[in-house]
Amino acid sequence: MGMERKRCAKPALAPGQRLHNNCRMNEHKQGKTPRILKETTQLIRLRYLLVLCLALLCIALSSPAQAEEPAEAFNGYYDIVITLVDRGTGENLPLARIPQYTPLFVVPSEDPRHKGYGTTTYEGQEGFVLLRNLKDLPRDRADDRAGLLMYARDVRVVRELGLHGAKVLRRLGPETPFVVLGRNQYMVKVEVDGLVGYTYGGKLEELGPDTPHEPLLVYSLREQALRSHPLSGAAAVQNLKAGQLLSVLAYNRGYYKVRVQDLEGYVLKENTGSINENTQDRMLVYSLHEAALYQGPGEGQRTEQRLVPGHLYEVTAQAGEYLRLRENDLFVHAAEVQTLLMRAFTKPRLASVDAETPLAPLPEVLPDETLVLKPQTLYAFHAASGSWWYYDDGETQGFVRAKDLRALPEKSLAMNRTWARYLGEETQLLGGAAQQAVARDEVLMLSQMWGDDWFSTSQGAFVHRSKLDLLASDAPLTPHTVAATEGLVLRSLPDEALGQTLFNLEAGEALAVTGFANQYLLVNARGKAGYVLGRTLKTHETRFLPDEQPRPVEILVNKSNFMVSVYLLDGDGRRVGEALRSGITALGKRSTPTPSGRYLLGEKQRWVRFPNTVAPHSVTYLRGRYLHGIPTEGRDESTVTDWGISELGTFATGGCVRMPFDLANWIYFNCPSYVTVMEVVNGIE
C-alpha cells in the first residue's frame, strides 16, 4: 500500500486533489515540469483567445457604423486659459493659447520625460498641455423647462457642446423658436429645426398658447412672410403677396394665426387690413375661371352670372368670406378669386419708357403685345401693386414693372425762363392738373426741369426734350441802364424770326438792363419788357456778351491738372480744334468731391450765396453744385477773397468748379444753359 502511494496511482478516490498535489510535489522534487499543469494552461489560453475573437467578431457585425467614426473625440476642457507647448527640445516652447471652456481631446503621455502632460490638437497644431486642471466634459441633466417651446428676444448662438468655446452650429436671430431638451452645468440643450445643440439659458421666454378668434377675413397689406410661429425669427412657411386674403383663426403675441389656402401660419396683425375699413387702397380681384356670382353673401343666393376670367374687378365691401364687387354690385366667394392690392399714389406719378414696352393684363403674366407704351411720351400712373405700376387712362389698362419705367423725379430743378419751339405731333400735352393744347412750331415758355429729358411749361404741361428746339434762356445781370443806339427794335422773344416787334427804339432812349438771352439783352423800355440786340450796348458788365448766336460748345474739366477748357463741337457733337478758353480751377475736396461724369448746365445766377461769401457768374451742374468765379466778401468783385485765389489748382471746394473771374464770366455768357454739356474726367490719355 505504501508502494502504490509512491507511484501515485490514478486519482480515483475523492481526495484525488491531495493525491495530485502530492504527485506534483514529487515531480517537482525530481526537477520535472508538471505535465498536467502545462496542458491546462495551454487550454485556458486557447479558450481566452477564442472568446476574444468571437467578441470582436460580434462587435464588428453588430456595429459596422462605429468603425467609420473618427477616433478622436472630446474628453475634457479647462476653465482657465492654457498654453499649447512643444516639448520636443525638453523645454516648453509656446505654440498657441487655448481659450477657457474649449473642448479638447487630451491623451496622457506615457513617456516619462513628459510626465504630467498630455497631447492634444488645437486649430491644426499638435502639442502638449498640462493635465493639471483638466476637467471632464459637463454632463447633461434634466431641466424643468424640458419640452417647452421657448425663445429669446436677443441674438443667441447654438454650440456643438455645452461650453462657450465649442463650435458654433447656428446663430439664432431674435425671437427664433426652439424646444428645450435638457441642460448641463453651463447651458441648456435645445433643438432648432432638427438641429440639436446648446445655448445659454438666461432670459428665455415660453411661447404661450393661441387665443381663439372669431372668424374674420383680412388681407395682407404688403409682401411679407407667413411664419410657422408668432415670432419674428420663426421660419417662413410661405411668402404672401400684398392684398392676399387671409382667414383669421386665432391670436397670439400681436400675431394673427391665419389660413391661406391649405396652409396655416402667423402674420403680424398690424400688417393686415380689413376690407370694410380700407379707405386708402384699392383692392382688385380676378379669377382664372368662371367663378360664380351671388346676389348676397350666402351659398343660397347664387346667380347664373359668372366672372370673366382674367378681368379685374374692384372690391367695395366684405361680408364674411364674400366680397362685393363695384362693377355689378354682386358678391363672389373669397376662395374663388385672386387679389391685387393697389396702393394709390398720393399724387399721380409720371414716367416714360426708353423703348416700346407692352402692358401686362396682370402682374407676373405675359404682356399683351397690342397694348404698348411708347418712348418720349409721358404716362400718368395712379397706383401700384407691389413692384408693378398700374396704368389706366379710361381706355387702356394694364401693369408694367417699375424697373422698366423712367419715373420723373419727385422734385424738379429750378430753371431760368427758357423759350422753345415745339416740334412734336401731339396736340395735347399731359399736365399735372389738366392737358395743354399745343400746335407744331408754337413757342413754349419752359419753367421747370425734370431730370435731363423733361421740361414743364408755364402752364404745367410736360414735354420731352426731343420734341423741342430750345431757342434761348434768360440769365440775370446786375441791373444797369444803357442808352439805345440807332435802329434798335424791341422784340417779344430773343429770336429775330419768331419774336414779334413790340416797337422801334429811339436813339438815346434809356433801357433798363436786367438780363440777357444769347446775343440779346433783356430790357425794360416804356413800361414793357423785351429783347434787344446787345452788340452796340455793351458795358463792363456785359463785355463778354456774344455778337451773334453762340456756337455749340462743350466744357472739359480735367481733375488731373485742374484745368477747365471750352471747345467747339462739330456737326457730330465731337470736340474739335484748340480750346476757345481755358484756365486753372479749384475742385471739390476729398469729403465733397467734384464727381466725374457728363452734366448738363442748368440755372444761371449772377451771384450765388454761400454760408459766409458769395460767388459771381454761377451756373448749376448738379443740385447744390456750381461752376462759378472766385468767392467775394460782397456783390463786388473788388472784395475778392485771398484764399479763393490761393486755392486755385487744389482740391478745396465743396464740389463746385471755381474759376478766375474772366473765365467764369465768359462761360456765363457763351455757354447756353440746358444745351451745353460739361464733362469732368480724371485725366486725358
Image: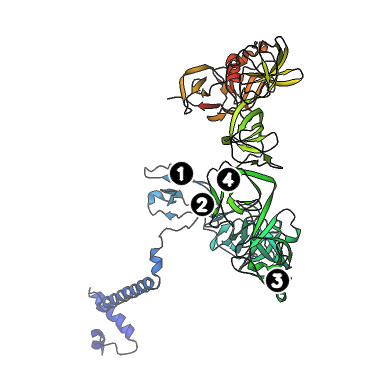
The residue where tag 4 is placed is: 405
Label 2 sits on what residue type?
A: Thr
**Whole-percent x and y of residue 494?**
64, 23
The residue closer to the viewer here, 530 or 203, is 530
**Callout 4 secondary element:** loop
**Callout 2 secondary element:** loop
Q: Earlier in the sequence, mark 1 or mark 2?
A: 1
Label 1 sits on what residue type?
A: Ala
Left or right of residue 419, residue 579 in this image: left
Label 3 sits on what residue type?
A: Tyr
Q: Which mark is residue 566?
A: none
Q: Is residue 274 visible?
A: no
The residue where tag 1 is placed is: 96
Q: Is residue 224 visible?
A: yes
Label 4 sits on what residue type?
A: Leu
**Whole-percent x and y of residue 140?**
56, 63
Left or right of residue 548, residue 107 in this image: left
Q: Earlier in the sequence, mark 4 or mark 1?
A: 1
Give the CA separation, mark 3 to mark 2: 69 Å
The residue where tag 3 is placed is: 294
Q: Earlier in the sequence, mark 3 or mark 2?
A: 2
Q: Which mark is residue 102?
A: 2
Image marks 3 and 1: residues in contact by CB distance under 8 Å: no
Give the CA separation, mark 4 to mark 3: 39 Å
Q: Earlier in the sequence, mark 4 or mark 3?
A: 3
Instruction: Look at the image and tell me in which quarter the C terminus lies.
Output: top left
Give the CA separation, mark 4 to mark 1: 59 Å
Q: Earlier in the sequence, mark 2 or mark 4?
A: 2
Instruction: Look at the image and tell me in which quarter the N terminus lies.
Output: bottom left
